[in-house]
Image (cartoon, rainbow, N blue to C red):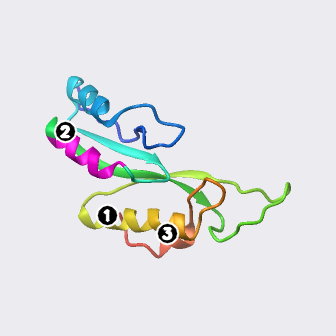
């Protein structure tokens, strides 16, 4: 059987969206023989520390990521019926420690500069100016 790892998993840290506990995710990954699994919560990396710690307990390689909300302009805060806040999902994964730091910066900037209503948002401009994850 070919090796398989889930690279798009939401945990309880995907606020109002994810249901899987990190421990439950790791138990399932180990039971299914996965060597790695990714945590890609919506708009945040709140569970990253706990995710890595749990993965190490189960001998599963943790892949930290985030499912960002990508918009045309993260600074825009006023919208109309004709010009809506269209958000698209953009999944990014950290391939190493530098990638993790860059994803952390993107998450922080999404809240500092891009927060609209409950949505921490990024745009293509900030992606172009951030080193690769």
Question: Which of the numbered marks, if any, corresponds to residue 60?
Answer: 2
Q: Where is residue 100 in the image (x, y as percent from the top left)?
A: 31, 61
User: Would you call the spot at circle 1 few (<14 residues within 10 Å), some (14-19), or many (20 or more)?
Assistant: some
Of 50 and 128, nearer the camera is 50
Task: Give, as a single range, the part of the protein colored magenta.
Answer: 47-56
Q: Name the residue under label 3.
A: 109
By secondary structure, the bulk of the magenta-drawn segment is best described as helix
Q: Does the residue at mark 2 contact the one at mark 3 (Cβ under 8 Å)?
A: no
Q: Which badge, 2 or 1, comes first in the chain's sequence?
A: 2
Name the residue rendered at 47%, 76% in the picture.
Answer: 129
Instruction: Please report contact status of discs 2 and 1: CB closer than 8 Å, yes or no.
Output: no
Instruction: Please identify the quadrant where the C terminus is shown.
Output: bottom left
Upstream in sequence: badge 1 or badge 3: 1
Is 59 positioned to the left or the right of 100 in the image?
left
Q: In this view, does 10 lie to the left or right of 119?
A: left
With 75 as the anchor, is 51 left or right in this view? left
């Amino acid at each position: 059987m070919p090796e398989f790892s889930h690279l798009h998993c939401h945990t309880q840290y995907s606020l109002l969206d994810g249901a899987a506990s990190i421990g439950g995710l790791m138990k399932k990954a180990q039971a299914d023989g996965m060597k790695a699994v990714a945590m890609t919560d919506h708009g945040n990396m709140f569970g990253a520390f706990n995710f890595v710690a749990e993965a190490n307990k189960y001998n599963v390689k943790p892949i930290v990521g985030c499912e960002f909300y990508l918009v045309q302009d993260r600074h825009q805060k006023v919208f109309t019926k004709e010009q809506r806040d269209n958000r698209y999902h953009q999944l990014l994964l950290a391939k190493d420690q530098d990638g993790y730091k860059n994803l952390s910066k993107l998450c922080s900037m999404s809240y500092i500069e891009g927060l609209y209503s409950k949505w921490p948002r990024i745009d293509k401009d900030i992606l172009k100016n951030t080193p690769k994850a």
